Image (spheres, rainbow, N blue to C red):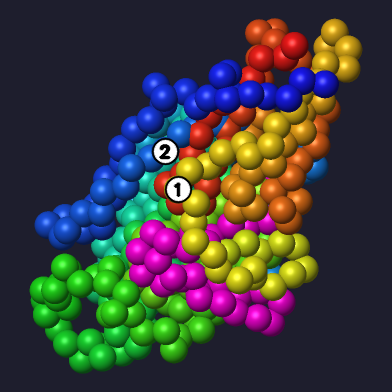
């Protein structure tokens, strides 16, 4: 058995890049620095693309527009194109090294799908435009989605603006959109007008920038960059504040929020050749992160540990990606002895 060392287990710095999230044209942008990339590995089939948390609303007339594409992206199995609009029950999927950016029709926010992600539109109620009674619900069955959502989407705030004409709502002070002091925490996650659902939890947004990742067994990591996210599971709810994360494992309530580590990393790692064509990979990551080995998402336990027997690639090097829910991502190239 060979234990990895710091000399060769280093991220590929060529993959660093910066990503700027623009919520609405003309408003203040949130600049996010992306850190590292990695590989996916799956040893269990992905959980079924069903959610017990909401029923699909098929009467909506609103949509999410495809604003940016990179790589292979499909909508309901067909190639996606710039300008395509997704309605209720539509499913968008990104392939390897692909991304897609969707803008909510009323300009309340944007969603970025990482590679190997599947998202379904579950509800788009309310009228198109700046309707204070809108509800937007998406379901992630696998992968990662990062979102930036305006503060006025929070129910306590939107109730106070419901009587204002659209032009007054559009003229709100955007400088304070992501200020923690401006957040109202009374609204429950499952009643939030913008919700992200996964096989094990529902995350309700209170005006924020945040990320959600879903592993192959449904385990969900939630990381808040700015603002507040409420996450609910098994009858319990917790608030994930700025720069904190929480994890929801199958049949368990959300973990107590903790500070988000600055980097995604393989904290422990061993690789052993078992035969000319197989190797055993043992490691650990932060509990909220997803691990991909040669483009397959793998199952990790509640502590982020994994133990996998995999086929050796022709290069005899495993590409391993450790991907966090929001802006943390790291890639490793691991040789097999």
Which labelled disc corresponds to residue 23?
Answer: none
Work out whether 138 lies above or below 326: below
Look at mark 1 in the image and give the residue it sits on: 262
Residue occupying image coordinates x 44% and y 28%: 71
The residue that mark 2 highlights is 35
- Residue 324 x, y percent position in the rendering: 53, 47
Q: Earlier in the sequence, mark 1 or mark 2?
A: 2
Q: State yes or no: discs 1 and 2 in contact (Cβ < 8 Å).
A: yes
Q: How many marks?
A: 2
SS under mark 2 = loop
In the rendered image, which quarter is residue 318 located in? Answer: top right
Q: Residue at x 58, y 18 (%)?
A: 8
**Residue toward you, 74 or 280:** 280
Query: Foreground residue, 287 or 132?
Result: 287
Range of the magenta residues? Answer: 216-245
Q: Is residue 120 magenta?
A: no
Q: Nearer the viewer, mark 1 or mark 2?
A: 1
Mark pair 1, 2: CA separation = 9 Å
Question: On the image, which quarter does residue 23 sit in?
Answer: bottom left
**Crowd around label 2: few <14 · some 14–19 · many ≥20 (10 Å):** many
Side of 231 where 131 appears, left or right = left
Quadrant of the frame with the C terminus: top right
Q: Is residue 331 left or right of residue 22?
A: right
Query: Relative to 40, does residue 233 appear above or below in the rendering?
Result: below
**Disc 1: CA contacts within 10 A as few (<14), some (14-19) or many (>=20):** few
Residue 36: image x %, image y %?
46, 34
The residue drawn where x is 32% and y is 74% is: 180
- The overriding secondary structure of the stretch rendered in magenta is strand
Which element is circle 1 on?
A: loop
Position in image of residue 309 (x %, y %) = 83, 28
Question: Is residue 97 among the parts visible in the rendering?
Answer: yes
Query: Where residue 13 appears, x then y in whole percent?
Result: 41, 24
């Amino acid at each position: 058995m060979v234990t990895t060392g710091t000399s060769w287990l280093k991220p590929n710095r060529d993959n660093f890049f910066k990503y700027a999230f623009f919520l609405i044209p003309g408003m203040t942008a949130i600049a996010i620095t992306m850190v590292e990339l990695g590989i996916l590995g799956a040893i269990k089939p992905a959980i079924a693309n069903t959610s017990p948390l909401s029923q699909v609303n098929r009467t909506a007339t609103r949509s999410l527009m495809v604003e940016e594409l990179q790589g292979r992206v499909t909508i309901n199995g067909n190639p996606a194109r710039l300008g395509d609009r997704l309605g209720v029950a539509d499913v968008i999927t990104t392939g390897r090294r692909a991304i897609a950016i969707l803008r909510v029709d009323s300009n309340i926010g944007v969603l970025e799908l990482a590679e190997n992600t599947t998202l379904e539109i579950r509800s788009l109620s309310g009228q198109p435009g700046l309707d204070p009674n809108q509800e937007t619900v998406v379901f992630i069955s696998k992968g990662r989605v990062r979102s930036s959502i305006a503060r006025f989407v929070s129910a306590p705030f939107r109730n106070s603006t419901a009587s204002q004409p659209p032009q007054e709502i559009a003229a709100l002070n955007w400088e304070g959109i992501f200020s923690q002091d401006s957040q109202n925490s009374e609204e429950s996650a499952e009643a939030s007008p913008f919700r992200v659902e996964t096989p094990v939890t529902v995350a309700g947004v209170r005006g924020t920038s945040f990320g959600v990742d879903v592993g192959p067994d449904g385990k969900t990591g939630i990381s808040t960059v700015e603002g507040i996210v409420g996450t609910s599971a098994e009858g319990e709810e917790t608030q994930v504040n700025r720069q904190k994360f929480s994890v929801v494992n199958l049949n368990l309530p959300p973990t107590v929020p903790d500070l988000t580590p600055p980097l995604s990393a393989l904290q422990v790692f061993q690789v052993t050749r078992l035969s000319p064509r197989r190797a055993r990979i043992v490691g650990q990551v932060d509990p909220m992160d997803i691990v991909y080995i040669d483009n397959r998402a793998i199952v990790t336990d509640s502590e982020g540990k994994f133990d996998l027997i995999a086929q050796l690639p022709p290069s005899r090097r495993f590409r391993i990606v450790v991907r966090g829910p929001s802006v943390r991502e790291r890639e490793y190239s691991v040789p097999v002895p």
